[in-house]
Image (cartoon, helix red, strand yellow):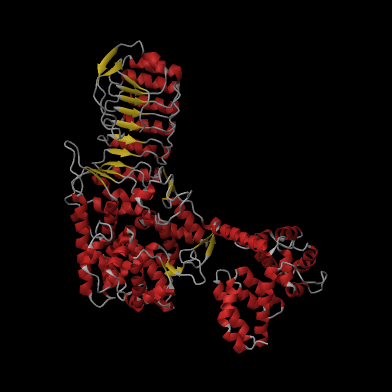
Amino acid sequence: MCSREEFQAQRSQLVALLVSGSLEGFECILDWLLSWEVLSWEDYEGLRLLGQPLSHSARCLLDMIWSKGAWACEKLITAIQEAQASSHSPKVHACWNPHSRQPTQDLQSHRPAVVRKLYGHVEAVLDLAQERGFLSQYECDEIRLPIFTSSQRARRLLDLATVKANGLAAFLLEHVWELPIPWSLPFEASECQKYISKLRTTVSAQSRFLSTYDGAENLCLEDVYTENLLEVRTEGNLLKNAHKVLTSRPDAVSALLRKFVYNEYQLRGFSEEAIKLYLRKCHREPGMADRLIQLLQSTSALHGLCHLPVFSWMVSKCHQELLLHKGGSPTTTTDMYLLILQHFVLHASLPDSASCGLGPALLRSRLPTLMHLGRLALWGLATCRYVFSAQQLQAAQVDSEDISLGFLVHAQSVPGSVAPLEFLHITFQCFFAAFYLVLSADTSAALLKHLFSCHQPGSSPPARVLLRLCVQSSRLKEDSELALLKKAEPHNLHITAAFLAGLLSQEHQVLLAQCQASEKALLRCHACARRCLARSLRKHFHSIPPAVPGEAKSMHAMPGFVWLIRSLYEMQEERLAREAVRGLDIGHLKLTFCNVGPAECAALAFVLQHLQRPIALQLDHNSVGDIGVEQLLPCLSICKALYLRDNNISDRGICKLIEHALHCEQLQKLALFNNKLTDGCADSLARLLACKQDFLALRLGNNHITATGAQVLAQGLKDNTSLQFLGFWGNSVGDKGAQALAEALTDHRSLTWLSLVGNNIGSVGAQALALMLEKNMALEELCLEENHIGDEGVHLLAEGLKRNSSLRVLNSCHKAFRQSVGSLPACNSVLEEPAEGTGMGRLPTAPTVWQAGCLFLFQGHHC
């Protein structure tokens, strides 16, 4: 017999035995203990909870067995031996009465043998049990979940038979008796097959199930997945022989590595419809999702933040605080993270604290925990560590109470018996690092200057202060400090700086001032951060190259510019924004391919609205969307041109944009190529052309406008006297649309460039355009490639050109043009600059052969 004292003395060895194998071995031991009635059914259910680490379940089993006495301790030792023996020999040694009058009890008594005989036959048994009415389709689907192995499915079937009183137990007892004995594999082959099965099951489960940010639950992807937008890049092979690389931090991929990537798919976030769908999936109770959606639609800034899935998760998590409290909705990213901090702190506090909100008293009570987490976060950023071992947590003075707040979760992707911890999200690590810097008495001006610097981390000696703040107890050598700092990721330090600016805003200063001993230190930190931010902005603006003589000064924003603007927006100081752009003298601001979303649009509008001179704002190839368009409205009055190509904008966003543009005297050009526009926005566009008689260019290429929309737009074009460029490439206006546009342009005196490439125009539309060319004396360039005008349409256009003296360029790929115009008289002239916005630049002005005043190009450009 094994006494309880001997059992307790061998505890560490027993834990090692229980966890040395896989979960399969542990469950096999439970089978034996259950069959001998060492464990009750309640004991067994408590030990098989999903999501628990195997080491935790093993210790719970030892505690349970020890409390049952020496007999139970002896039985556990025997069960371990039986499980080890059965893993080496797949033979089944059991005999039971298939017609027993107590089938449920016999299933439990012979559980190990029943599980072994069911192995490999579970699918067939499930089909037969469902066919005979013992199981429902839902119960079969639950047992067949890919997260379970074949043995685990067999056990779940037996567990179900224990609680169902419909004859399932008797059916299994009789049917399993008739099953053939499993084929005996050599030990090595058997272990290999088990490992293959386990690996297949694990991969299948990981591709179907997803853990939440807080690690509290596992969700089926089919139930919670919400459609995202992917951006395809045509460059992007990062690793040798690697076909696909997945990373949550794409900014860590350097430009040198990115050039080896063949295709790059970048997650662009939620669309407006995806935000609604996500919230409805998270809140299925009646009315709750509708209330949240209504709140977002009435709060523009918060709606813009939810473009990123992590903010949609925050809104879902903090729905009670958002709906019940009247303190105003979050505006900045910092506001949102303080709201989630309030949610977690209140959840971990006494119930009476919930009505008080995140006040100074409650924050002070948790200040040691927040500072411990902040110190750990900052040290991790400085050393590029995002997963922390128990020793590292202890060095940062992070204890179990700090972990219980909920911001640190187990890193499940890291192997090992004791899983290390990581922050819920990398942005939470940056937030706590900023929180620590704001409230730390040791934060120096040199450190703040480094954080708001546009240089790479580690490039200046003041950066060494960063490590001294984090690991004050460690004395690292100079070389080690520099090596660690060179590995710090700039993107994460930029996020930290933006959070620091937000925490130092006027709105949050009162709260933070009441949480620390020295209000003077906080004010000094605010003043220093403000100076550093303003200095970095001025330095960035001064780095812009001088303008080319005779042209407006152009600025192509570098990645640091967007970050600096975001930091300025987080601080919410209009005076600082006004000072920052006071001396900015540019005519064109270009932010293409800069990952600009709705939140960045809000920051841009916050700063750019204070410019003294109008600019052309180019935001092509970003993720602006309808929500981002709404965020840009405050700065629309200073835009003389707005380029929004390829930004996932629909009719709703454009209609709202035009509604404001009608009152903006400066706006003269609008480019909307490759969006989601339909005929639904045609009325607004027609109104824009009819009301703004100084409007110059409208680009609508590659959208979904049909003949109906073109006919509506033509009505506005008739009343317009200023438009010079009209782009319709890649739509579907057809013959009727071409007829309407041609009629509107017959007497138009300002339009010089028209693109109708790829619009399914036939000979009828070509005839209308030919009649227009006979009377229109302003149009200089007409693009008609990729249509179906045919030979008849070609001849009609050629006849119209005989009476036209203004058209200089006719772009078409039709070979019949050469024959149609071959007999026309020739003259010499020069090719003028291509249409505005084509990106082709000025062509050489060498003499060129013309045919009847018209140059025929057979490979035109698209707009």
Q: Quadrant of the N terminus?
A: bottom right
Q: Could you tell me which quadrant the C terminus lies in?
A: top left
Judge whether residue 432 can be spotted in this image.
no
Residue 539: which quarter of the image? bottom left
- Who is closer to the viewer here, 416 or 330? 416
x%, y% of residue 377? Answer: 36, 68
Residue at point 38%, 53% (across, down)? 253
Is 211 left, or right, of 496 in this rendering?
Answer: right
- Identify the residue at image location x=24%, y=66%: 447
Residue 326 percent coordinates (x, y): 36, 66
Q: Residue at x 36, y 14 (%)?
A: 821
Above or below residue 3? Residue 80 is above
**Viewer-proximal residue, 663 or 222?**
222
Residue 427 appears at what percent x and percent y?
37, 62
Q: Quadrant of residue 555?
A: top left
Q: Is residue 781 rendered to the left or right of residue 243?
A: left
The mark total stands at: 0
The quarter holding residue 94 reads: bottom right
Position of 208 relative to 442 (above/below):
above
Q: Is residue 420 above or below residue 293?
A: below
Image position of 747 with respect to 541: above or below: above
Residue 836 falls left or right of residue 305: left
Asked whether the viewer can see residue 222, the reply is yes
- Where does residue 640 sit, x and y in percent of width and height? 25, 41
